[in-house]
Image: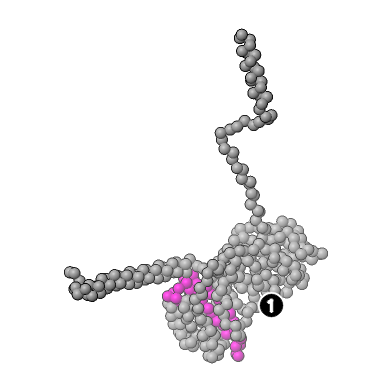
């Protein structure tokens, strides 16, 4: 009997195992986990390419995040404009040679300002990048947040430089927006190659500014643009200064006007409009100086969801304070209107019922 029971149990176990599908994986109470694919970030685009338009670098470009030894004389200026890093490369093509030096800045403001600093008289404009200027076998151009100095062994290959400009890493967003202050320069009589843009005293003094740097007071975080104008008796100049707030501009305009009067400048040499101060000088006739100054007018621009150019910390703080003042005024006026409506309405109803205006 015992043998029969053991035989019957073995037969049942055999039938049960035979009924299971082959290679059935063991069930687990732990839910299956989804696998997220690992996406590797793209390597950063090099500041200078290994090759472009048939030009090939002799070796890996030399790079750095501090000043290049060749830039030591202009170190204070480059740091003032916000230099981040640089790259230098030597290229060859069909026996020719080119040395390209790229300097990348924190934003387009720095790249444009450095471009105007290094551009000198006698350079002619070129259609390369955002703006370019060349003389002899050297060409400067800037694009995005990068300034490039290209020196050829002979006549510059301008078509190749256009290809190089397209290979420079782009600068999307607010960092790639150029400053708007130079566009306030009146066009009549303007000599474009003379435009200089400054955000600090080092570049301004090195470029021979028309006003003392301490009179502008760069501790107030201004933007400054200077330019020369054709005059009947030589050349004149115009300086436009934009301060973070009109209040700062009022105080600085008074100080500048007093200083110029002491030096014998005409009384109409200084003009203020909002946060802008315009100062005319040089050999400008009275009428021409007056017309230039009157052409500099500040018009507030309301933009929605547009990238802005360089905005200083002082300007940001001033805008925040003004916004708080406006909001406080609106809330106070609204409270007064609500109080007058509720209190006056109650008094009017009591008067219609023949009751005293106040129950007190």
Q: Vertically, is 36 above or below 257?
A: above
Would you say 197 lies left or right of 215 here? right
Q: Quadrant of residue 16?
A: top right
Q: Vertically, is 34 above or below 284?
A: above
Q: Vertically, is 62 above or below 247?
A: above
Q: Which range is magenta?
A: 220-249
Horizontal and vertical percent position of residue 231: 60, 88
- Quarter occupied by the C terminus: bottom left
Residue visible at 42% across and 70% down in the picture: 322
- Quarter occupied by the N terminus: top right
> What colour scheme does the image use?
one colour
Could you tell me what secondary structure mostly forms the magenta stretch?
strand
Q: Name the residue that disc number 1 marks.
A: 124
Would you say 330 lies left or right of 174 here? left
Residue 290 in sight in this render: yes
Residue 83 in sight in this render: no
Front residue of 232/51: it is 51
Task: Tell me, yes or no, whether the highlighted magenta stretch contains residue 245.
Answer: yes
Helix or strand or loop: what does disc 1 sit on?
strand
Task: Tell me, yes or no, whether the highlighted magenta stretch contains residue 222.
Answer: yes
Would you say 34 lies left or right of 326 here? right
């Amino acid at each position: 009997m015992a043998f029969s029971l053991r035989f019957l149990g073995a037969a049942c176990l055999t039938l049960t195992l035979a009924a299971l599908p082959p290679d059935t994986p063991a069930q687990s109470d732990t839910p299956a986990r989804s696998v997220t694919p690992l996406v590797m970030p793209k390597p950063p685009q090099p500041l200078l390419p290994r090759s472009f338009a048939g030009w090939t670098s002799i070796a890996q470009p030399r790079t750095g995040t501090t000043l290049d030894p060749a830039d030591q004389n202009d170190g204070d200026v480059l740091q003032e404009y916000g230099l981040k890093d640089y790259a230098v490369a030597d290229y060859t093509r069909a026996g020719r040679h080119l040395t390209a030096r790229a300097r990348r800045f924190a934003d387009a403001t720095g790249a444009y300002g450095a471009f105007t600093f290094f551009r000198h008289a006698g350079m002619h404009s070129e259609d390369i990048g955002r703006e370019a200027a060349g003389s002899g076998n050297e060409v400067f151009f800037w694009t995005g947040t990068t300034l490039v100095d290209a020196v050829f062994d002979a006549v510059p290959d301008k078509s190749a430089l256009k290809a190089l400009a397209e290979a420079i890493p782009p600068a999307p967003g607010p960092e790639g927006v150029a400053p708007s202050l130079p566009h306030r320069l009146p066009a009549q009589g303007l000599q474009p190659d003379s435009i200089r843009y400054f955000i600090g005293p080092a570049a301004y003094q090195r470029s021979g500014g028309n006003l003392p740097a301490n009179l502008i007071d760069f501790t107030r975080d201004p933007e400054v643009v200077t330019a020369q104008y054709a005059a009947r008796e030589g050349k004149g100049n115009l300086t436009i200064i934009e301060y973070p707030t009109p209040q700062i501009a009022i105080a600085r305009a008074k100080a500048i006007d007093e200083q110029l009067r002491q030096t014998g400048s005409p009384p109409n040499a200084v003009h203020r409009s909002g946060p802008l101060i315009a100062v005319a000088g040089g050999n400008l006739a009275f009428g021409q100086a007056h017309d230039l100054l009157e052409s500099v007018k500040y018009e507030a621009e309301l933009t929605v969801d547009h990238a802005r150019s360089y905005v200083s910390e002082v300007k940001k703080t001033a805008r925040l304070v003004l916004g708080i003042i406006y909001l406080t005024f609106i809330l106070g006026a609204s409270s007064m209107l609500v109080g007058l409506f509720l209190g006056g309405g109650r008094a009017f109803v009591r008067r219609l019922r023949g009751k005293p205006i106040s129950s007190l």
